[in-house]
Amino acid sequence: MVQVSLSTSTTFDGDLNALVEDQGTSLTLRFDLDEPAPAGGLKVYIDSNTEQILNRLDLPGAIANPQFENLNLLATQTNVDNSGLAVQITEGSTFATVTLDVFDNVEPDTFLPETFDGLVEASLSLVTADQIAPEDQNAVTNVSDYTIDPNGASSTVLFADTESQ
């Protein structure tokens, strides 16, 4: 069975794995496989501990100007509370990446200030099909069978409005 690891990097010019809205930084998610993705591809799922965190990323901009390698973007799904994302790695690939710009939202946020305003630390973690939360099972479908590399199971990303945060 394919083993998957997750890593993240940002374009923030500093020591932290951070996205800063007023600097327009970007997040790259990288998935590494210990063997090529099987026939039909490998659908993997990442979830976070932060409701709506995907909405701090410029998803409309990513649709207009996609930056990815070895992914079938048509198979992408988000979970019910926009805290997680499923992507399909193309058949035969040993890695895949997707780069997403941070979204510069207006402060203060009236919808969910605890997610959209200020500094938020989000832990992004790989999840196997049998670990998908019951409320997300209708939104995130057809996740493949894979194991998770314990050294690449999760990554923490800081989301901030300004560098000073």
Image (cartoon, grey):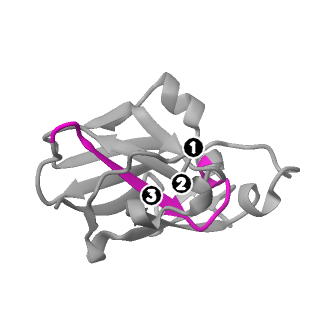
Query: Who's the residue at 81% across and 58% down the image?
Result: 113
Query: Who's the residue at 76% across and 58% down the image?
Result: 117
Say whether residue 152 is visible. Answer: yes
Label 3 sits on a secondary structure element that is: strand
Observer-side mark, 2 or 1, equals 2
Q: Horizontal placement of 87 versus 148: left or right? A: right
Residue 132 vertical placement versus 137 (above, below): below
Residue in front for this viewpoint, 82 or 160? 82
Q: Horizontal placement of 126 versus 144: left or right? A: right
The crowd level at tag 2 (other Cα within 10 Å; few <14, some 14-19, many 20+) is: many
Mark carried by residue 24: 1
Residue in front for this viewpoint, 7 or 165? 7
Residue furthest out toward the bottom: 150
Q: Which residue is mark 3?
A: 46
The crowd level at tag 1 (other Cα within 10 Å; few <14, some 14-19, many 20+) is: some
Q: Which residues are magenta?
A: 39-54
Q: Are marks 3 and 2 in contact (CB under 8 Å)?
A: yes
Query: Who's the residue at 58% across and 54% down the image?
Result: 136
How far across and how far down the image is residue 159, in percent? 61, 60
Label 2 sits on a secondary structure element that is: strand
Q: Which residue is mark 2?
A: 84
Mark with earlier residue (3, 2): 3
Mark with earlier residue (2, 1): 1
Queried whether the magenta region covers residue 141, the answer comes back as: no
Q: Horizontal placement of 148 versus 139: left or right? A: left
Q: Amino acid at mark 1?
A: Gly
Mark carried by residue 14: none
The crowd level at tag 3 (other Cα within 10 Å; few <14, some 14-19, many 20+) is: many
Residue in front for this viewpoint, 118 or 90? 90
Quarter the N terminus occupies? bottom left
Say whether residue 127 is visible. Answer: no
Residue furthest out toward the top: 64
